[in-house]
Structures are given as C-alpha cells and as structure tokens.
Image (spheres, rainbow, N blue to C red):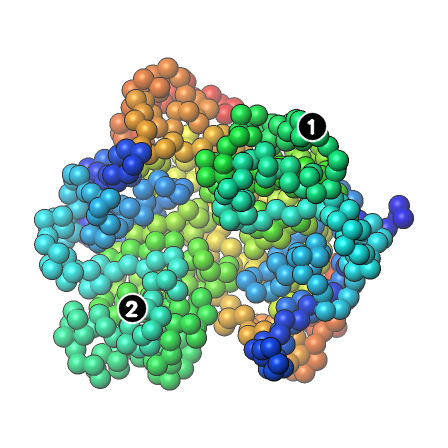
Amino acid sequence: MSSRLLEIENLNVHFHTPEGIARAVDGVSFHLDAGETIGLVGESGCGKSVTSLSILGLIPSPPGQIESGKIIFDGHNLLDFAAERLRKVRGHEISMIFQEPMTSLNPVLPIGRQVAEPLMIHQGLGKADALKKAARWLDHVKIPAAAKRLNDYPHQLSGGMRQRVMIAMAMVCGPKLLIADEPTTALDVTIQAQILSLMNRLKEELAMSLLLITHDLGVVAQMAARVVVMYAGQIVEEAGVGDIFDDPFHPYTEGLLKSMPRIGEGIGGAKRRLSEIPGIVPVLTEVIQGCKFADRCPHAFDVCRRSQPQLTDVGRGHRARCWLKEYPERRKSDA
Amino acid sequence: MPDAPLLNIVDLVKQFPLGGGFLSKPSAWIRAVDGVSFKVDRGESFGLVGESGCGKTTLGRLILRLIEPSAGRVEIDGQDIMALDRAEMGALRRKMQIIFQDPYSSLDPRMKVEGIITEPLRATQQLSKNQRREAAAELLEKVGLRRVDLDKYPHEFSGGQRQRIGIARALCVRPDLIVADEPVSALDVSIQAQVINLMEDLKEEFDLSYLFISHDLSVVQYICDRIAVMYLGAIVELASTRDFSVATRHPYTEALLKSVPLPDPHRRTEPFAMEGDVPNPIDPPQGCPFHPRCRYRFDRCSLEKPPLTAAAPDHLVACWLNGGKGLGNED
C-alpha cells in the first residue's frame, strides 16, 4: 500500500524584499505516501516552514509568491484551487499544528468552541453535537476532566495541555495529512515525550500521513520513516531514516549529525570535540553560482563553486545534491 | 580566603508576591527558589537543569544579585555579596558575568559592537578610549569575529555571531565566573556546536568557571563536570556528570533522561511518558514535590518532604526510596 497522498513538484516560492528576491523555496520536489511519516529537517531559514505553508495556501502574499510548481494532493493540484475550495481542504483533509500553541489558539474563545469549529464548518454538525464530539476528542488527547473544561480559555491551560488542544482541533475532522511544524520545540522534555507518544498513537489509529517539520534530529530518529534535509531553500538529501543516520551522503547532513552532543556519550572516556559546520547560512537574496553549501563544506573544490549540483540518486532511493557523487575521490576521509 | 570555593550558595530562598497592590497585601507567595545550597569550585563547570518554572533562571539572577534574595547567602571567594554596598558590589561584578539566552534582545540595538563590549570596562576600569577599543578588538578576535566588526550594529549579525558578541562582553572584565543562562538554546544545531566549542576553549584560556543553566540535558552533560537537577525551586539531585547519567538516583532525573528522544533510528523507544504536568508552584504538593508524577511513590512520599542528603560520596539526592538513597541504579 504505497499510494501517493502528496506530491510536490519543483516548487518555487519567492519573497519580494527590499534587498531583492529571496528564494525561500528553490525547486523543491518530494512525495509523501498514505500513512507515511516524513521528517523535514533543516535550520532556521532553510525553507521548511515556507514549504509547508505553501501546501495549505498560507503564504502571506505580498511579499510571498508561489512562482511555479505543483502541489498534488489526492490527485488534485492544490495550486489550481480557488481560495474557497482550498478552505474546504484546510482543517478537513489537511490540518496543521504549530510550534507555539498560545499564539495559534484564539485567546478569547473557549477551547471547546475552538475544537468544535472545524466540525461545524466542514461537516455541518450542529453546535451541540459538535461540542459533544469535541469533548470526546479532548478526552482522547488526555485532557483531564475534558467535559468540564470545554469552557476553559487557552490561558487557563499549561503549554502541554494547549498543544493537546491544538492536536484535538487538528484531528477532529479525521485529516488524511497532518503537518506538524516544530510541534514540541516550545515544550519541556517530559511534556515533549507525552506529545510525541500521543501523536504516534493517533497516527496509527487514523492511518494518517504526517509531515513532521523539526530541527531536532532526535525527534526525527524516533518518529520518521523517511527524512528530507533542506538547506537554503533546497533539498540537499533525502533517504530512509536509517540511511540518513548511518550513511549520510551530503556533507551538510553529516555535519549536522556530528555537531550534536549526545546523551551518555563519552562518559568516563575522553571528551570528543564537537565538530562544527564553519560559517553561516547564505543570505537567500544572494544569487549563488555553485553549490549553496560550498562555502561551509570541508570537501568543496572548484566544480562546487562553479556549478550547482542536481539532486540525484546515490543508491537505493537515497537522493543527494552533491558533486561528490560524480567525484567520489574528492571526499576527504578526515573531514 | 584562598581555600573558599569560588561560589558558595547557602539556603538561598526567593519568594515572589502574588497579587496585592500598593496598599493591599499579596494574596500568596511563590517560593521560586526554595532553600538551595551548593558550591562551585574554581575551574569547574557546574550545570543546573530542570524544566520551565523550576527556578533555575531566578537562581542565576540571585547569584549575580540582579534580584535580591528573601533569605540565605551567596558568597563569592568567601565574601558574602549581600553584605556589600553599591560600590563594593560594582567591583565584585568584575568577578562574575552573565550570558543570556536570547542574543537578539540582550544587545542594545542602538549601540555599536565596540560600545557593547566595552561598556563593563567603562563602568569598572580607568582605561583610555583607545585602550578600550584595542581591548575590544582583541576580544572580538578571541571569539571568532573580526576587528572591522567593532563599528557594526547588532542587527548586522546572525544569532550565533550575536551570542559571540555577548560572550566577548562577558569576558571583557576578565571574570572568574560566568553564569550562562541557556546560552545556546536559541541557536541552530550547527551554530550551537560552534558556540559550545568556543566556550570550552575560552574556559581554558581565561581560567573560567561556568554555572551553566539549561534545559538541554545533552548540552549540559557535554559541558559540565557536575550537575544539579531542580524541581519546583529545590535541588532534587546533585552528582558528578558520570553519576548523573549512569548511577541516577532521583526518579525525576531518570524521567528527564529517558524523555530525551535518542538520535538513533535503530533504538526506537516508546517515549517515557511521565503522567501529568509540573504542579502549580502557588500550591505545591504536600510531601515530596515530585510524588504526584512519580512512578515509585509510596505512602511516606505524600506526607513528608525528603531532605537532600548524601546517598553516596559526592552524590546528593532528595528521595525516600531505599531509606533516602533514591533509586538503586548502581553500575
């Protein structure tokens, strides 16, 4: 059962800024199968959030503009949809949870109303029925005494509880795809564990696909089946989660993995110096001839600075955007 | 007093009033820091971990006397900082500096980098303008920036570079102790490694001690020699980094360690879901503050608060299990 649920083809999203055109998403293509979890990884400004907002038609325009590409969901190109038709998909077949539950919940509406609202809009339920179903969902996401808390306001809940409300709201209509943008980044580690466990359980129950956007490689390792790594608006590597961690091809992915301190590492032994990725990410308005990572790459050579590598297969469905595919002898073993 | 530890904290308490106003009394008090004691030796990196609201940031600020404690003592080099007047405190500030979490809001946007870095020098030393500029340039190079950056404004730098500027500012008075409050939490992974390595190098070069406050266990474990775990304003476990990881004694420490998602797809573990939230500090639970969430609790835990006692040499724990020794996770 590997039916394509979502297929993004050559997506380009530009932001028109006083400094010039920022290519926030620069030719991104990937797909997501039904029931699959993909981890979309990268650092601030790499385009992971803009990619996900494009799927929902939520790019602020101006200054943002989807220049070209296709976003095919369940056989239809969402970019062809008029605003009204897209609204029927959003919150119904595709839902999203954001990093900061306090700013994405309405502070002046009781949480019961907020969870019930998608049911009233998308499924035409009456208020009483919708609230009843909302209470069941709040209970399902383990809000204690859910039925009594329908009239609570977001500020009366803790951060973890608010994120549970967000999840209930995203789930009530039984979406086929859930986009979760850094869903646990603002939470404490013990609460993060609770929320990840909840998301895993619901994903199984609803046979839903999950696009998980995060910078936390631990979360990715525990949740995702496939990983897409983005850098400066482009996909630089894509592979099964095992391949990404065991055998990363792209020097950026490798650098990310090595730069992370790990729990329990080096206890009683010598301390490993963390490996750094030198420098900083390029400015998105800058036009770069060659590979966007070349300035920070320990293996870079003349070709890398001259022309841009394509995202190509490096074996077993593992894709990478790197000249080391053509010039393997250039990979330095000690870098 | 050469034998005194660099930092000695004794029974430190900070209460914040809740409600109340100009003439009315507060309706309640929150004990944000509730009787904390520990020492930091010269050259040591001491980690303070815990979740939001556990009091770790308040504690950091008390140590620098950015806020006044309600009770208890803070000694730097054997000197009680509460006994100092304003001028003496100013001189003592040269011994300790702070680095903040958010490199965006902790630098004055209208000041050039030179001014930001040398501000502590203007306050505490008599150097000419040229000497100050020279000192700032030297420090910038030490933290991996360039002399030309002296005349730039904070907005011209990335987050990681701003944190470097914050570090240069802290180093400027050659302090003995740096309180680092979540210094890398706002940074991307690749930049985080740069700043951690920089802090390690500077520690050697400038003979620094760190009080490293963070919620990120992997970072704290990497940097620190000893770690204290805080829960609801009190230390529940204090041990060497090694014992903290392999001979964990407090159930809360165990839960924290097991909650961190492992960056290893071949070792998928069901997230260690500890029930419930951190309790409301206005109305802390009776007995052990952690007992409502503890999987090992028994009758005594809800009745009496366990004291922080030595369960093994240099290993303190506040837990009633095994006669006050906590979990028996001996290696």
Q: Can you tell which mark lies on residue B131?
A: 1
> In the picture provided, is A118 more to the left or to the right than B163?
left
Q: Given the image, what chain letter belongs to the residue carrying mark 1?
A: B
> In the picture provided, is A177 more to the left or to the right than A190?
left
Outermost residue, top direction?
A: A302
- Which residue shows up at 50% across the image and 32% down it? B152
Q: Amino acid at mark 2?
A: Met
Q: Secondary structure at mark 1?
A: helix
Outermost residue, front direction?
A: B128
Q: Can you tell which mark lies on residue A93?
A: none
- Give neighbour class at mark 1: few <14, some 14-19, many 20+ (Cα, 10 Å): few
Picture coordinates of residue B132 (x, y %)?
67, 31
Res B80 seen here: yes
Picture coordinates of residue B81 (x, y %)?
79, 56
- Which residue shows up at 13% across the image and 48% down it? A79
- Which residue shows up at 19% across the image and 42% down it? A66
Q: Can you tell which mark lies on residue A169?
A: 2
- Give neighbour class at mark 2: few <14, some 14-19, many 20+ (Cα, 10 Å): many
Closer mark to the observer between disc 1 and disc 2: 1
Residue B144: quarter of image = top right
Q: Amino acid at mark 1?
A: Gln
The quadrant of the image that shows the C terminus of chain B is bottom right
Q: Is B261 rendered above or below residue B272?
A: above
Q: Secondary structure at mark 2?
A: helix
> In the picture provided, is A280 more to the left or to the right than B128?
left
